Amino acid sequence: MTTNFGLINRTYSSSSNSKEVGTTEDQTQWERFAREVRQLNEQSDYGVEYKVLFIGRHGQGYHNVAESYYGTPAWDCYYSQMDGNGTITWADAQLTPNGIAEALAVNAFWAKEITEQNIPTPQKFYTSPLSRCCATATLTFTGLTLPASQPFIPEVKELLREWISGHTCDRRGNMSYIAANYPTFTFEEGFQEADPLWNATLVETRSAQDERLRSVLDDIFMNDRSTYISITTHSGAVASMLSVLGHRPFSLSTGAVITILVRAETVMGRPSFPAGQPWTPILTCTTPPPNLAPTTAEVKLSDAMMMRIQ
């Protein structure tokens, strides 16, 4: 959020070829980029299109705090299987106060870019069904000056969720719960009331996750004619999307956004993709690792943390 979502300050061929009124000097960097993208789409061959994806990771959730508190080894094998510790709850984790602040900071940055850069705002919004993403998307885009024809009405997509494992933080709430808490949200066709994917004993392989995120991108590119698209999701999902798009690895901190330009080509038939490996049993432990069990002092720290959160 320091420089235009990372947009490089440069000129484009469209600046000299365009017959539009206005010169490059008259335009902001985002206006020049938008002109270039528009020209790319106007001049592209049949079946080729360009989209700009604003891919955001949710703000800090209580599961992020818990993993940092217990340490990743103990979290993965024991605590992540629980709904909480009696002090905080991390099942379908909600945003922490810090996570809320992160999302509001992105909202303020969007407002600044809209005012100062005339940045193209998303024409379509998608979000993971998990609570931390629904909340992040709402805090990020509510109150912004958006075109009347492109309001913030996100669509919940099942496959935009985090790496699927036995972690309770990644078990989504029922459709009726999401609808009650986010009444303006819409749901993709076929979205089920109960979570059809979470399994307490199995974990999704990385290749299966990549194929899942490839399929949701295929769905978006095949059925959404929008050029500018917002996707609110998770760190693992972002990593898989970047991988299947051929982008270099780029790790997002909580609340961060990466913007990418994608060229897509529709081809006849189904391309041959590597098959995702079958899900595997999750490795757990019945008690906390002996050297990682919380001490009395740590429990008191947890109580103090809860007091600050409240």
Image: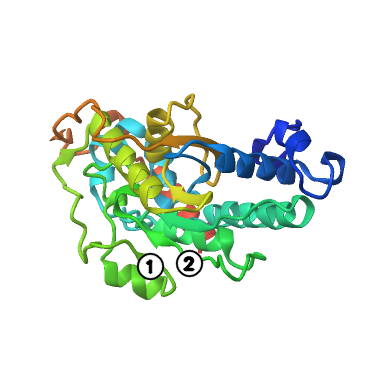
Amino acid type of disc 2? Ile
Relative to 212, does residue 188 appear above or below in the rendering? below
Residue at horizontal 27 percent and vertical 63 percent from the top: 189
- Image colouring: rainbow
Q: Amino acid at mark 1?
A: Thr
* Residue 303 percent coordinates (x, y): 44, 55
Residue drawn at x 77%, y 48% as measured from the top left = 20
- Give the camera-side residue of 274 and 21: 21
**Residue 310 left/right relative to 243:** right
Res 186 label: 1
Q: Position of residue 117 (x, y in %)?
A: 76, 50
Left or right of residue 142: residue 93 = left
Q: Residue furthest right?
A: 25
The mark found on residue 266 in the picture is none
Question: Closer to the camera, 160 or 222?
Answer: 222
For label 1, the SS is: strand
Compared to residue 126, the image places residue 162 above or below, namely above
Q: Circle 2 is placed at which residue position?
A: 153
Q: Position of residue 210 (x, y in %)?
A: 30, 33
Q: Nearer the viewer, residue 53 or 193?
A: 53
Instruction: Tell me if I can see residue 161 in this picture.
Output: no
Residue at (36% x, 47% y) in the render = 222
Q: For the point 71% across and 31% down, which residue is it?
A: 13
Q: Is residue 209 visible?
A: yes
Mark 2 and mark 1 in contact (Cβ < 8 Å)?
yes
Q: Secondary structure at mark 2?
A: loop
Q: Measured from the top left, where is residue 79 in percent x and y?
A: 28, 43
Q: Residues within 10 Å of mark 2 (few under 14, many from 20)?
A: some
